[in-house]
Amino acid sequence: MTENTRQTSTQIQLVARPDGWPTPENFRTVTIELDDLGENQVRVANEFMSVDPYMRGRMSDAKSYIPPFALGETMNGGSVGRVVASRSADLPVGTLVLHQLGWRDVAQDDAGAFRAVADLPGASPSLYLGILGMTGLTAYVGLTEIAPVAPGETVFVSGAAGAVGTAVGQIARLLGAGRVIGSAGSDQKVALLKEKYGFDAALNYKSAPVREQLAELVPGGVDVFFDNVGGDHLEAAIDVMNDHGRIALCGAISQYNTTGPAAGPDNLVKFIKGSLSMRGFTLGHHLDKAGEYNEKMSGWFADGEVQYDETVVDGIENAVDAFLDMMRGANTGKMVVRTA
């Protein structure tokens, strides 16, 4: 328990809903003077915050699975930090916590808004925002609940060099996939997928049409497609799906900033001919898998069977730029902002 010390918090707010690509003008940075701690409240100095594709949807006011960000108010999202002042016996000063009060350098709320996590010897706590957190769990749910992969099958992953994509490729292999194929946006990322992450093959979607490249890489077809991109990647995957193939729709980042109607796949008849299945999902409906995932990932991580990359941007004042860069594919692995 500690005495109250008044402190300020630098926070990022949404002030205008983007039309197409967001711009810095859609946001503002404010400094908030925090109130004295109330009973059972804690104050946390955030160390890292997450920027994620789903946040683009929350910047619009269209009906969705999660409420939109309110205009003129501080945004939120995944963050990890350390308790610096506390009136909670459960979260003393020094405790590392995971929470959803990102987009600020100092967070303050009731203790129930924070979850204590263990320090990671020799590793950054930012991993709780990536492979050891919701990012990894998303990949695991997609490959076990939504489009279950069976031993020996071929898996194709779009957006494979991103946070979820790199997790999907590795977890697919750990679950027994026989062949893993990925797509990425540069030759360097293609090389990384094959050399570091163990992908059997990968394509640079900027080099030639995905439809042409994928067909050449998978002469035996695809059994499971984990889609983070949509658009031409989804069309290309449908073309090469084997009978009874499964598609997990996790994201469609290629369409998040379009202002007109998005073009639909022109080959949906393949679903009838090949008895295919396609299912979209959001992680909030599958949090019951977290315990199972944490147990498996703890073993894989401890045994050195999982690789990861992070793209780290320093400074809360650069959080908007980090988000925009992530949406353009400038990151390799998980994009985080170091707010400390």
Image (cartoon, helix red, strand yellow):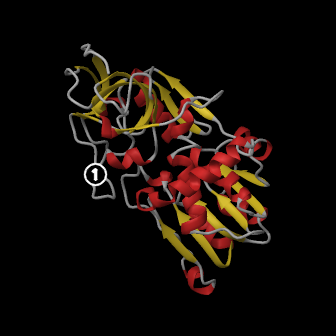
In this rendering, the answer to whether 240 lies above or below 189 is below
Q: Which residue is mark 1?
A: 67
Task: Identify which residue, 238 or 212, lies in the foreground.
Answer: 238
Figure quadrant of residue 309: top right
In this rendering, the answer to whether 49 lies above or below 147 is above
Q: Percent x, y for residue 33?
A: 22, 18
Total label count? Answer: 1
Task: Identify which residue, 329 or 119, lies in the foreground.
Answer: 119
Residue at far bottom of view: 273
Give me the residue at 36% from left, 33% from top. Answer: 90
In this rendering, the answer to whether 137 lies above or below 21 is below
Q: Dot 1, crowdedness within 10 Å: few (<14), some or many (≥20)?
A: few
Q: Does residue 206 appear in the picture of this structure?
A: no
- Quarter of the picture holding the C terminus: top left
Q: Percent x, y for residue 209?
A: 66, 57
- Name the element at disc 1: loop
Q: Does residue 305 appear in the picture of this structure?
A: yes
Q: Percent x, y for residue 61?
A: 26, 51
In this rendering, the answer to whether 154 lies above or below 190 is below
Task: Identify which residue, 54 or 217, lies in the foreground.
Answer: 54
Q: Percent x, y for residue 156?
A: 67, 61
- Quarter of the picture holding the N terminus: top left
Give me the residue at 31% from left, 28% from top. Answer: 42
Figure quadrant of residue 172: bottom right
Q: Amino acid at mark 1?
A: Pro
Tell me if 260 is positioned left or right of 214 in this view.
left
Give me the residue at 35% from left, 27% from top. Answer: 104
Give me the residue at 55% from left, 67% from top. Answer: 145
